[in-house]
């Protein structure tokens, strides 16, 4: 079972108690139980379908239709069967189901409460447009806001993310898809109350299900691309045993720099891919050069310096990588123009490449290679700061220093090092070779 901090468990328990309080008035309110049962069954069915399609997120139209049609306690109950019965891949599964059920119940209750206070049910019942749009729109905003607040809280407590960062962008990112689902929910509610009845309301779900299926196909294609990326990285690790795990660590360091610079989540993910793939071109470099002890000859160095171009050729057809492809090609450029493959200077070097360059150099210096021993983190950071402005972008170096001061760095031990551990439990020294500080293969 994955460890969940005690404070996160307490937070989930508090939200679950809040959900129970939302449901307490249910026996005292006039509730159309057949409508509640039908909406709850629809919600559970849509959740199962979304899980089977591996679609991202929760299917909200039915939940929001419940908020527009039912009293708040009944609307909150609609969310529970789907959330409690939906499949969960990660452990602890019970806690995750409880969290999702409580979060949705509280959010739907708040939306229904606001909708009722603004006279929304009467406007829906009389199909009073455009007046029905105002209470529905405010209810959707409240629903999205409560979801974002609760999500930010669990991120801060379970993942130990700073509070400000855990909430940053959550509301704005979720608003557009939730608004679309809210419009579909309003259409369901209006048709439900119309002379055509619930059967007509169900027709609204058809285009939403089709769009969900299409979105799921997109995610499957993306997952296939990511599997290809993993296979390429594993091939590099097998070829060069001294850099085993290096690509993943550079991806992690690139993410740390990007977060420190305030980049959005989508771009952070792209930079993670850039870090992971930056050395994929080494598949085209002879293995004897990658594993050579000591310094390289000028001719051997020229051969190794072709790996960014090889890598770019390999990944340029993967469209979703975006600027990660530029990072693969240019991560060995230097600000003073003495880098390779094209000798770009300063701002000519793509920002993604400047991020990966710092991450790559840092991990190269703090891990053991065939030509030298690993350096301490502090020494590596001092070297990066010394080379800032000539080789590395000072902004990226400063961002990495700040990120490491907060989160630390725990470099993985390579498989080769583990196989050569001495009696004292310390990796045995490897042959060292000459080379300029900050230069890496």
Image: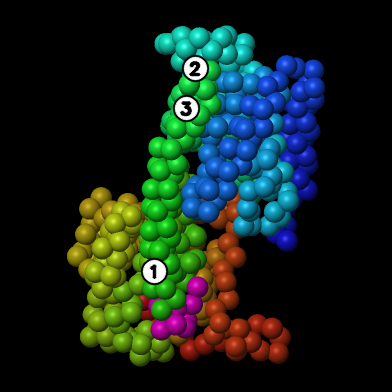
**Mark 1 surroundings within 10 Å by alpha-carbon count, few (fewer than 14), some (14 through 19), many (20 or more):** few
Q: Secondary structure at mark 1?
A: helix
Where is the N terminus found, in terms of image quarters?
bottom right
Q: Secondary structure at mark 2?
A: loop
| 87 lies above or below 199 | below
Quarter of image, res 228: bottom left
Where is the C terminus found, in terms of image quarters?
bottom left
On whether residue 78 falls in the magenta region, the answer is: no
Residue 112 lies, in percent from the top left, at 62, 21
**Mark 3 surroundings within 10 Å by alpha-carbon count, few (fewer than 14), some (14 through 19), many (20 or more):** some
* Mark closer to the chain start, 2 or 3: 2
On the image, numbered disc 1 is attached to which residue? 228
Residue 219 lies, in percent from the top left, at 42, 54
Is residue 352 visible in the rendered image? The answer is yes
**Could you tell whether 411 is left or right of 72 in the image?**
left
Residue depicted at x 44% and y 76%: 234
Q: Secondary structure at mark 3?
A: helix
* Mark closer to the chain start, 1 or 2: 2
Residue depicted at x 21% and y 64%: 343
- Which segment is the magenta one? 236-245
* Mark closer to the chain start, 3 or 1: 3
Residue 194: give its label.
2
């Amino acid at each position: 079972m994955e460890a969940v901090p005690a404070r996160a468990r307490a937070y989930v328990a508090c939200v679950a108690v809040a959900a129970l309080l939302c449901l307490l008035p249910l026996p005292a309110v006039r509730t159309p139980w057949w409508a509640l049962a039908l909406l709850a069954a629809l919600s559970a069915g849509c959740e199962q379908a979304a899980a089977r399609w591996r679609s991202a997120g929760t299917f909200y139209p039915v939940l929001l239709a419940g908020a527009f049609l039912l009293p708040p306690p009944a609307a909150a109950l609609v969310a529970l069967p789907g959330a409690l019965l939906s499949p969960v891949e990660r452990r602890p599964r019970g806690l995750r189901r409880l969290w999702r059920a409580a979060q949705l119940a509280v959010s739907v209750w708040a939306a229904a409460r606001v909708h009722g206070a603004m006279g929304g049910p009467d406007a829906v019942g009389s199909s009073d447009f455009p007046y029905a749009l105002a209470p529905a729109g405010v209810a959707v905003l409240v629903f999205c806001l409560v979801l974002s607040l609760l999500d930010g809280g669990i991120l801060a407590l379970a993942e130990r993310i700073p509070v400000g960062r855990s909430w940053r962008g959550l509301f704005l990112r979720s608003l557009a898809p939730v608004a679309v689902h809210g419009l579909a929910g309003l259409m369901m509610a209006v048709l439900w109350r119309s002379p055509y009845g619930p059967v007509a309301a169900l027709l609204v779900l058809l285009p939403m299900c089709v769009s969900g299926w299409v979105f799921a196909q997109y995610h499957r294609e993306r997952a296939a691309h990511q599997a290809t990326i993993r296979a390429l990285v594993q091939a590099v690790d097998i070829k060069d045993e001294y850099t085993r795990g290096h690509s993943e660590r550079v991806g992690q360091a690139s993410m740390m720099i990007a977060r420190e610079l305030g980049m959005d989540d989508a771009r952070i993910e792209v930079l993670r891919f850039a870090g992971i793939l930056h050395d994929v071109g080494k598949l085209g470099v002879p293995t004897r050069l990658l594993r050579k002890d000591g310094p390289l000859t000028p001719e051997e160095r020229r051969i190794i310096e072709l790996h960014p171009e090889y890598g770019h050729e390999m990944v340029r057809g993967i469209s979703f990588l975006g600027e990660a492809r530029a990072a693969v090609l240019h991560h060995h450029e230097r600000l003073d123009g003495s880098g390779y493959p094209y000798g770009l200077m300063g701002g000519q070097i793509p920002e993604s490449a400047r991020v990966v360059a710092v991450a790559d150099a840092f991990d190269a210096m703090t891990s053991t290679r065939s030509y030298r021993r690993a350096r301490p983190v502090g020494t590596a950071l001092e070297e990066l700061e010394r080379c800032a402005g000539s080789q590395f972008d000072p902004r990226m170096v400063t961002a990495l220093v700040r990120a490491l001061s907060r989160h630390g760095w725990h470099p993985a031990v390579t498989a080769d090092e583990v196989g050569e551990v001495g009696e004292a439990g310390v990796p045995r020294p490897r042959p060292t070779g000459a080379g300029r500080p900050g230069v890496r293969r």
